[in-house]
Image (cartoon, grey):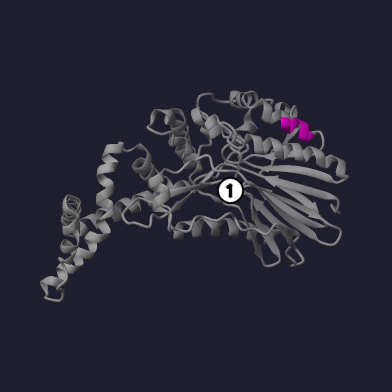
Amino acid sequence: MGEKKKYYIISDLHIGGDGELEDVTFKSELIGFLNSLSETGDSGEDVELIIAGDFFGFWELSTVEGPVQLDFVLDKYADVFQAFRKAGESVRITYIVGNHDHTVLGYPGSKEKLGEYNIFLDENQHLIREIADEKIWIEHGHQHDKFNEIEVPGSELCRPAGFYITRYLLSLAGLISRMGRKNWLVNVRCVQPLNALPRWMFSSYFYLEMHPLLRLAIVPFLFFFAASIVLFMLGILDIFGLNSVQYLYEDFLEPFGVVGSVVDTIIGIDVLILIIFVVVSIPLFIVFRDIKSALKRYGLVYEKKEKAEKERAYLEGARKVFESDRSVKFFIFGHTHNPFLLKDGDRYVINTGTWLERLERVKSFIWPFPAIFYPRYDLNYFVISYDGKDTVIEYHRIDKTPSTKLTLLQRFLISLRKKPPAVEIPSITRTSGFDG
């Protein structure tokens, strides 16, 4: 049963938004993908494209409210939806909602409006599809996220914590992004997870928003801060008579004249700052620990521990589905914007990722410069089919140059760091165990 089926699965396009967020940076790639689907109608296979939630960015769109949001997006991106209409003539297109676009279920006539573009809006919170007597469970994934779970899908009154973060931060950022020195606020929805926003805001302020003269004045102090730590430690050793080379650096700097004197002054100031920092470190530690604890309660702290806890919640959700129905072979979701394929026993858990640009934190190789958020795209989609012998999972990634450009200083500070690699998922996975 379902042997001739072929399922294409994508999610998290987030089409729509305020101000600069209106720009669909992957539009040409999306239209190209849809055009390629139009050609599959001649293959003789029963092909279905499934959009697993967050098709629309209604949370990011505050300039229009209610049912008008759908009309606005359909009109604004007419060329994109014409491509959907054309693809829908050859393949079936099914769409289920996510947390950012669940209100479309409550908009009168939304099914009919989307149907005009050959997009079928399924009101269920998950889909079941079959392939070679095996079931595929497909959902958006916000059901396992306490900050974004929706109690009553379709209700505009159902607004989890994630809604307010998105509406009052992301949409505002889209509206005012042009007002800054550089148009960096537009990238606010590219930061994943949202817990990393405080660090991204500080990093972007330092590298992109801070007055150039102020940054120029601060940069030398930060460059020599590491040297000041070494000299501070040597000074402590000198107090106990364990060091005789504390001031050798002065002999090294003397031949450089004025430049050497300037460097010596900067390092001296850094050492003084370090001494003050050490003196106040205990009360500062208590204060920062309390601030971090408060941010953690609001879900605004991003650490490996928090990331692992979130990933575990989705995996536990998948396992509950597997336990409730042993015929479910695949659990597919999106929401987190982090694509992966995980084998759990003889079952498979798949995250469909996002088509938005992604910003990932990379530490500077010179402390205490702020970390840099490295841009990249993972325009990906999964295909599940049966080749007559085995069920096959295909992973496809469309190459795209990042829209965000790093400054010279940012590129230098991560030049010795390993950059986030492209997502490593096998292009072909056979459920029999043979990977190609």
Numbered range of the magenta stretch: 83-88
> Is residue 79 left or right of 280 when viewed as pictured?
right
**Is residue 85 within the magenta segment?**
yes
Q: Which residue is mark 1?
A: 143
Q: Main secondary structure of the magenta part?
A: helix
Q: Residue at x 35, y 37 (%)?
A: 209
Q: Nearer the viewer, residue 359 or 258?
A: 258
Mark 1: secondary structure: helix
Q: Residue at x 17, y 55 (%)?
A: 264
Answer yes or no: is residue 299 visible.
no
> Could you say where residue 105 lies in the image, as x and y percent from the top left?
64, 33
Residue found farthest to the right:
44
User: Residue 132: where, in percent of width, then height?
Assistant: 83, 57
Q: Is residue 190 left or right of residue 132?
A: left
Task: Give the x, y percent position of residue 210.
Answer: 32, 38
Q: Residue at x 16, y 63 (%)?
A: 251
| Above or below for 430 versus 381 | below
Mark 1 is surrounded, within 10 Å at the Cα level, by few (under 14), some (14 to 19) or many (20 or more) other residues, namely: some
Give the quadrant of the N terminus. Answer: bottom right
Residue 341 against residue 300 in the figure, above or below: below
Residue that extends furthest to the bottom in the rendered view of this protein: 242
> Is residue 293 positioned above or below 23 on the image?
below
Q: Depth check: 386 or 325 in front?
A: 386
Q: Is residue 129 left or right of residue 141?
A: right
Q: Quadrant of the C terminus?
A: bottom right
Asked where in the image residue 115 lies, by quadrant, the reply is: top right
Image quarter of residue 109 = top right
Q: Amino acid at mark 1?
A: Gln
Disc tally is 1
Q: Is residue 329 left or right of residue 151?
A: right
Can residue 58 be seen at all in this image of the molecule? yes
Q: Is residue 107 magenta?
A: no
